Amino acid sequence: MSIRKTVGENVRRIRVGKGWSQENLSERSDLHRTYISGVERGVRNPTVEIVEQIAFALGVPITELFNEVFEK
Amino acid sequence: MSIRKTVGENVRRIRVGKGWSQENLSERSDLHRTYISGVERGVRNPTVEIVEQIAFALGVPITELFNEVFEK
DNA sequence: ATGTGACTATAAGTCCGTA
DNA sequence: ATACGGACTTATAGTCACA
């Protein structure tokens, strides 16, 4: 499992858990909608500053986005 | 405190704790010596894959590099 | 509401040096 | 052994039209 996939799955899981759309998170994080989409799918390799920005928008500590997801 | 500074201080703290030089870590992580220097000083904004690479070389979980450092 | 390909501008990451 | 700079190549940031 790549780190990009891990981050992406965590972002999506937390976002959906809050009932937010990608557009919603995009506004809150000040990142483009299609960029959020790419991060969630693991096709982007974001910098630490971008990950921090997303974590802040989601209201979770940045470390939470690096936790391995076992379900599925 | 910026996320770059946090990551940099953690990398340096753990590296020095192991008694390694930057050159030593650079070989183990397969990253350039001057780049490691930049990360530790917080002047670089590494991608998540690079941070994972450094964490692996240091033998610590990636989340450890994001923990706030309070001492000093 | 989301995925994808393509695009430009900017920054990541390498390599050469000097102090 | 480390900081820092310049020049360089490659990848990401950031955006759009369209499926």
Image (cartoon, coloured by chain):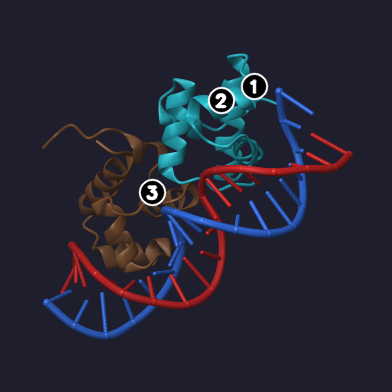
Chain colours: A brown, B cyan, C red, D blue
Where does residue B29 sit, x and y in percent of width and height?
49, 29
Q: What residue type is labelled 2?
A: Leu
The chain holding disc 3 is A
The chain holding disc 2 is B
Q: Mark 1 points at which residue?
A: B21
Q: Quadrant of residue B39?
A: top right
In the depicted view, which residue is nearer to us: A67 or B38?
B38
> What mark, if any, has residue B25 been given in the picture?
2
Q: How far apart are marks 3 and 1 (CA)?
A: 37 Å
The residue mark sitting in front, 2 or 3, is: 2
Disc 2, disc 1: CB below 8 Å?
A: yes
Question: Which residue is at a point 28% across and 48% down the rendered structure image?
Answer: A8
Vertical side of A31 occupied by B16: above or below: above
Q: Do labels 3 and 1 share a chain?
A: no
Q: Quadrant of residue A72?
A: top left
Q: In which quarter of the image is residue D12?
A: bottom left
Q: Which amino acid does label 1 sit on?
A: Ser
> What mark, if any, has residue A59 been given in the picture?
3
- Which quadrant does the N terminus of chain A fall into? top left
Question: Which residue is at a point 40% across and 64% down the rendered structure image?
Answer: A31
